Amino acid sequence: LAQDKHCWVRQTVALNENASVDALAMLAQDEKWQVRSAVAKNENTSVETLAMLASDKEAWIRWAVARNENTPKEALAVLAKDIDWRVRKAVASNKNAPEEVLSNLAKDDDTSVRESVVHNQNISSHTLAILSNDKNANIRYNVASHQKTSLETLAKLALDSNYSVRYAVARNKNTPFETLTALTQDKCSYVREEATQALSERKVKNKCVKAR
């Protein structure tokens, strides 16, 4: 079936979760991009085959490789520099993307790529610090809401020009006491109220801990 004359048959084989590694390696060289794309999506495809497909001329195939969680880190690093933003975004969303790759993608020209970086579970406080300077307020909001964001970055974002970012800082459970106290004097009532409530809840929690 892997050598069937009909493209749709070969594509079906390439998508089959029981397809052998050898069959997928052969189909990875198929003349039809639809078949090669199916191979790139298959979880059984070997790392060697995925690495080969990472340099395919068709962007949709490189995109599928970038999304595959079995793609080797070396290939992801190459795909992170792809000319197509959709490929770079797929790398930014891949849970196995190395921190160094995410750090570089945090400086990408495309907003959607940077947004994918901030939602990646592997993101570090260092990369979050980079994104705290992003021109997009929604990205800075997500950084301010993130549990891995450092105390220093939270303190800086508490001075952000966008009130929603400052509001997110006030809501973050890791925001330092001093920063919350400063936010109780914020010019935006929503931020002041959230910071005041957060401080009140912490005081009650601290009392309960001491009482034990």
Image (tube, rainbow, N blue to C red):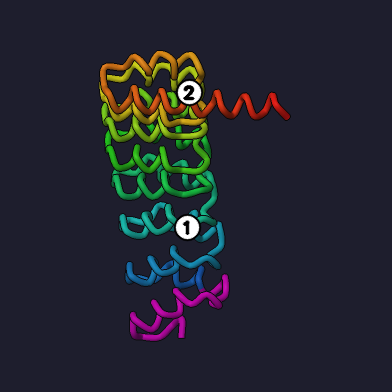
Tag shown at residue 97: none
Q: What residue is drawn where x is 42% and y is 48%? A: 93
Residue type, label 2? Leu
Disc 2 to disc 1, C-alpha distance? 44 Å
Residue 111, compared with residue 186, is above or below; it is below
Residue 106, compared with residue 26, is above or below; it is above
Give yes or no for contact between labels 2 and 1 (Cβ–Cβ under 8 Å). no
Of the image marks 2 and 1, the number of the one nearer the N terminus = 1
| Along the line of sight, the residue nearer the viewer: 3 or 89 | 89
Residue type, label 1? Asn
Instruction: Answer left or right for 193 relative to 53.
Output: left
Q: Position of residue 27 (x, y in %)?
A: 45, 72
Secondary structure under tag 2 reads helix
- Write down the residue under mark 1: 68
Q: Is residue 97 visible?
A: yes
Tag shown at residue 199: 2
